[in-house]
Amino acid sequence: MDRWFFEMPTLELCLHLLGKELTLDGVGGYIVEVEAYMGPEDRAAHSYGGRRTPRTEVMFGPPGKAYVYTIHGHHCLNVVSGPEGVPNAILIRALEPTRGVDKMIERRGRDYDLTNGPGKLCQALGITRQHNGWDFLDSPLRISEGIPVKTVAVGHRIGIENTGEARWYPYRFWIDGNEHVSRPRKALKKIQL
């Protein structure tokens, strides 16, 4: 991957992240589900209204960095996207596990549902707030080429009920038919790649 990959418009990058391989120290899998958060205009985004805090600062920097935050005791991994200074991010919601599955089972304490949710995948890969700001091109936390994707399903984001109209934005994307998606729901539409 090159820097230009992360500089493409956020909603376009969502489509291109699907099927890419996410790894940390040799443990990981293929990205099968993502959600876009579109910065100052998006009530569901941490940077809504231009909010700039120590927690959100990484989103204002160059794209291709990890934005890791904690919610309800779980870590969530995001890819900083779009042009520098525009605080957009893409939440990695689910992976299809492919590398280091034994390590994932050890970390999760189970051999099922290893990476089908943002908190689960962070626990399985060992991603914590320590990884906030890491560069996906120049660190052990990597996004690299993966598998081809033919059909992408598009739907509403999940778990943001208190964000008004933003909860209905069609900013959730997943590989159609993939069994590792966090919460299967009916797609609003499907895109052929």
Image (cartoon, grey):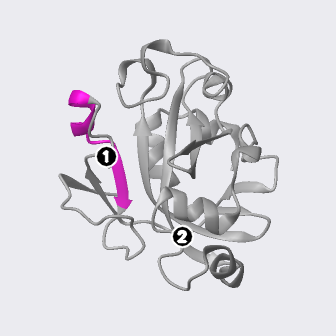
Residue found at x 53% / y 58%: 119
Q: Which residues are magenta?
A: 164-174
Q: Is residue 165 magenta?
A: yes
Q: Would you call the spot at circle 2 few (<14 residues within 10 Å), some (14-19), or many (20 or more)?
A: few
* Mark 2 secondary-structure assignment: loop
- In the image, which disc is placed on residue 149? none
Q: Residue 40: give x, y in percent of width and height.
A: 43, 18
Mark 2 highlights which residue? 147
Which quarter of the image is occupied by the C terminus?
A: bottom left
Mark 1 highlights which residue? 157
Q: Is residue 99 left or right of residue 138?
A: left
Kindly report which numbered mark, 2 or 1, lies closer to the viewer in this rendering.
Answer: 1
* Mark 1 secondary-structure assignment: loop
Label tally: 2
- Please name the amino acid that badge 2 sits on: Ile
**Quadrant position of residue 105:** bottom right
Residue found at x 77% / y 45%: 130
Q: From mark 2 to mark 1, how far is it between C-alphas?
A: 24 Å
Along the line of sight, which residue is nearer the eye, 115 or 79?
115
Q: Would you call the spot at circle 1 few (<14 residues within 10 Å), some (14-19), or many (20 or more)?
A: many
- In the rendered view, tell whether residue 64 sits above or below residue 112: above
Q: Is residue 149 left or right of residue 43?
A: right
